[in-house]
Amino acid sequence: MIIEYPEYYERFRCIGGSCPDTCCAGWEVDIDDESGDYYRSVTGDFGKRLNEHICECDGERYFPLTKSNRCPFLNDKNLCDIYINLGEESLCQTCTEYPRYFMDIGNYEQVDMSLSCMELARIFYTETEHINYIRSENDVCGDELSQDDQATLIEVLALRNQCISVMQDNDGSFTEKFKTVRDLVSEAQGLTSEEGDTARPYLTEDYSELIVLLESMDSINDTWTEKLNYYKKVSVDSKALSRLGDFFRDTDGSLDTWMSKTAVYFIFRYFIDTLIDGDIEKELCLIHRSLRLILFMLFAEWLIKGTVQVTDIIYVSHLYSKQVEHDDGNVSVLKDTI
């Protein structure tokens, strides 16, 4: 199997209790079968505590959140009591893999990491000027693909790499480069640039329409709910929106760099979904909307502070990813091109 991943994958290390927004809060933790069976076998006081917190529903096991919206094993130092009492090897698959994700198509595996992790986002935006991708091979065989699917996979990966190259080019603004990405997708669809963009109604959505899409999703936590209420007010405030020009001028060079890099993240992560969705337009729609929303969230932060720093793009991309990317239903909402 061919495995491909960004070079920052190898540099990531969880910072545990030092994380400003721990992944052990806000999400219920799904327990894989092997870990669940092991947890059931643990004896003593900690084994009793483990079993008291395991919930089972429809054959699935998980740790529900406490009233304070935290994993029941996240202690007051933001460290994991399972890790402390039973060792790193005892962590369930969810906790071991996060923020990594894996997508297997035939004999190709794409590996990446989620911006919902603030430490990964910090590395991504501050330590990675140009994102390089590493390929390796192992002896594992994936599912066999039909000739048509194999050909589609090769075409999609080639297009993905071409689009990433465009977004990492130092020439041109973020807007100009992403227009080129849309043109490349149109060309792959057998359309002219004009035909492609004419057939994309989502390109004309204003910020208030995009916020409506976010409102349709279940909120991950109170922080998100408060932020979303603020974003909604800004999206319909003509006086605030009139300052967009000032925002773009104030953040000129940095904004282009941050948004181009964010586009690379989404292109690498989602273009491969074409093999599942059957239509790359869905992926382009998701990426376009995500970039617009993150840009708007950054603008909203600028309205409060009068300036934005790299810490702000780290924060808003993390917040967006945490709310949207870990729920297939939310992702589907943003892929809906109608």
Image: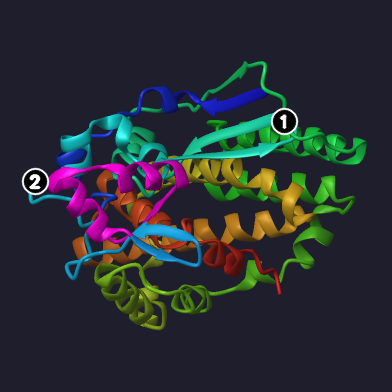
**Mark 1 sits on what residue?**
142
Estimate how packed mark 1 is, as few (under 14), some (14 to 19) or many (20 or more) residues with alpha carbons within 10 Å: some
Q: Are marks 2 and 1 in contact (CB under 8 Å)?
A: no
Q: Amino acid at mark 2?
A: Lys
Magenta range is 26-54
Q: Is residue 296 left or right of residue 159?
A: left
Number of labelled discs?
Answer: 2
Q: CA distance from mark 2 to mark 1?
A: 42 Å
Which residue is located at x 57 percent, y 51 percent? 175
Q: Position of residue 299 (x, y in %)?
A: 35, 62
Which residue is located at x 79 percent, y 67 percent? 199
Which residue is located at x 76 percent, y 44 percent? 184
Q: Amino acid at mark 1?
A: Gly
Q: Is residue 327 left or right of residue 226?
A: right
Q: Quadrant of the C terminus?
A: bottom right
302 magenta-colored: no
Estimate how packed mark 2 is, as few (under 14), some (14 to 19) or many (20 or more) residues with alpha carbons within 10 Å: few
Query: Which secondary structure, mark 1?
Result: loop
**Mark 2 sits on what residue?**
77
Query: Which secondary structure, mark 2?
Result: loop
32 magenta-colored: yes
Depth check, front residue: 171 or 158: 158
Q: Position of residue 164 (x, y in %)?
A: 61, 35
Q: Name the dominant secondary structure of the magenta segment.
A: helix
Which residue is located at x 46 percent, y 73 percent? 214
Q: Position of residue 135 (x, y in %)?
A: 61, 19
Q: Foreground mark, 2 or 1? A: 1
Q: Position of residue 109 (x, y in %)?
A: 63, 32
Specify how the rendered protein is coloured: rainbow
